[in-house]
Image (cartoon, grey):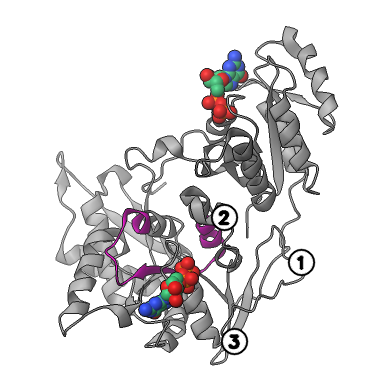
Amino acid sequence: MTKPVIAIVGRPNVGKSTIFNRIVGERVSIVEDIPGVTRDRIYSSADWLTHEFNIIDTGGIEIGDEPFLDQIRSQAEIAIQEADVIIFMTNGREGVTLADEQVAKILYKTKKPVVLAVNKIDNPDMREMIYDFYSLGFGEPFPISGSHGLGIGDLLDECAKHFPKEDEEQYPDDTIKFSLIGRPNVGKSSLVNAFLGQERVIVSDIAGTTRDAIDTPYSYDGQDYVIIDTAGMRKKGKVYETTEKYSVLRALRAIERSDVVLVVLNGEEGIQEQDKKIAGYAHEAGKAVVIVVNKWDAVEKDEKTMNLYTQQIREHFLYLHYAPIIFVSAKTKQRVHQILNIVQRVSENHAMRIQSSILNEVIEDAVARNPAPRDKGRRLRIYYTTQVAVKPPTFVTFVNDPELMHFSYERFLENRIRETFDFEGTPIRLIARARE
Ligand code: GDP
Ligand code: GDP
């Protein structure tokens, strides 16, 4: 299921990132824990009461060296493009400014719901400052205070009223949804064209799909596929091209809706930081992953090149040790036809269920061969393991004390499970829980 998206727009210094951080709270992310990345986080999942959603701080999307007003205009356009509900944020202490009116003008153009927030209303005496903001034409302004955490619940209640109804874009269960992600120019569109067998990406806008996602349904060898979000590739608008953060954001949205993610690399170039970041999200989101090295035709090679390249990928993408790697050329179509077969295979693994009895035999056998090490005189005891979810396969192990399950032992158990069952291409999750 796709989560609704809220985007925050508004001129600088009204408090967008303060509110974003308040709403997002403390969220740990293995990818974003890289120093320097956390600070400029602009996209995150969040929840409020029973609602789960994603939220974008458009203020963090810098667009080239556009002048100030053009920047906030572009950010408002992105909000309109990406969001289900838009929070239009203003500063109650400064009243309505020219820049606020510019943002309003752009937001008038969308039919999407806009909720007007007036920030920096730090105490009840200041509430009358909000009346000025009715003039913007978005109805009742919501007073909030980012620094004091006031009014945010009411604001989110209002947003939630406008969330789209669930299940608007369900495909049949046996349809495999996949996306191609990677830096600009690695050849994503060319690959899609290559396996669609057409010169241009044919885009069919499926009735009922929401939020501008344009999907391409495709059938091959008796299997139905949907290629997610070729829109991001097609619309090589100025903003998309010049803004790394925006293209990452599009990739994240596509990853979320996919079962299988093809991480596309350019074989002509080395592996870059952005490649790793995007691939990390796919892993974190629990998606099946295939690494596709494109432009293999343009690589000068001998019989060792493929091995060397594989080694490099394994070193750079440590957490993706389960992902198959395929070397292709969209140009000559070399091995392109194998991609969908691999997608199908890893997708089956991603949805695989293992019988508890067999699973427990494997674990018992593993423990017998390599008992958990002692920790401060105590030893981990494993009682029972069961699979609680698919996509990705998720296992709960009941133990005497979850603290005793160390990373290295967890890794050992994961490897034993992988050696026994074919989980190629999919992450698997092991959760240790204390037996009641
Ligand atoms: P952005 O540019 O819109 O993302 O704004 P920031 O979140 O960076 O906030 C700009 C400034 O306003 C910072 O100095 C914040 O500490 C301050 N600020 C944010 N929210 C509030 C608030 O509710 N009350 C007051 N008094 N200051 C706030
Ligand atoms: P995208 O931005 O990732 O969608 O990349 P495109 O599909 O637009 O391709 C970017 C450029 O790389 C274009 O000029 C393509 O013709 C070229 N290209 C794509 N695939 C290949 C390939 O397999 N081999 C070679 N030599 N060039 C390719």
Above or below 4: residue 221: below
Q: Nearer the viewer, mark 1 or mark 2?
A: 2
What residue is disc 1 on? 208
Q: Position of residue 218 (x, y in %)?
A: 60, 83
Q: Is residue 277 left or right of residue 121?
A: left
Q: Quadrant of residue 425?
A: bottom left
Q: Secondary structure at mark 2?
A: helix
Q: Position of residue 228 (x, y in %)?
A: 58, 69
Residue plotted at (80% across, 23% down): 133
Q: Earlier in the sequence, mark 2 or mark 3?
A: 3
Residue plotted at (41% across, 41% down): 28
Q: Secondary structure at mark 1?
A: loop
Residue 272 on the magenta span: yes
Q: Is residue 26 left or right of residue 274?
A: right
What residue is disc 3 on? 219
Above or below 48: residue 146: above
Q: Is residue 261 visible?
A: no
Residue plotted at (56% across, 62% down): 236
Kindly identify the amino acid type of the residue bearing the numbered disc 2: Lys
Q: Is mark 1 within 8 Å of ligand 2?
A: no
What residue is disc 2 on? 238
Kindly identify the amino acid type of the residue bearing the numbered disc 3: Ser
Q: Secondary structure at mark 3?
A: strand
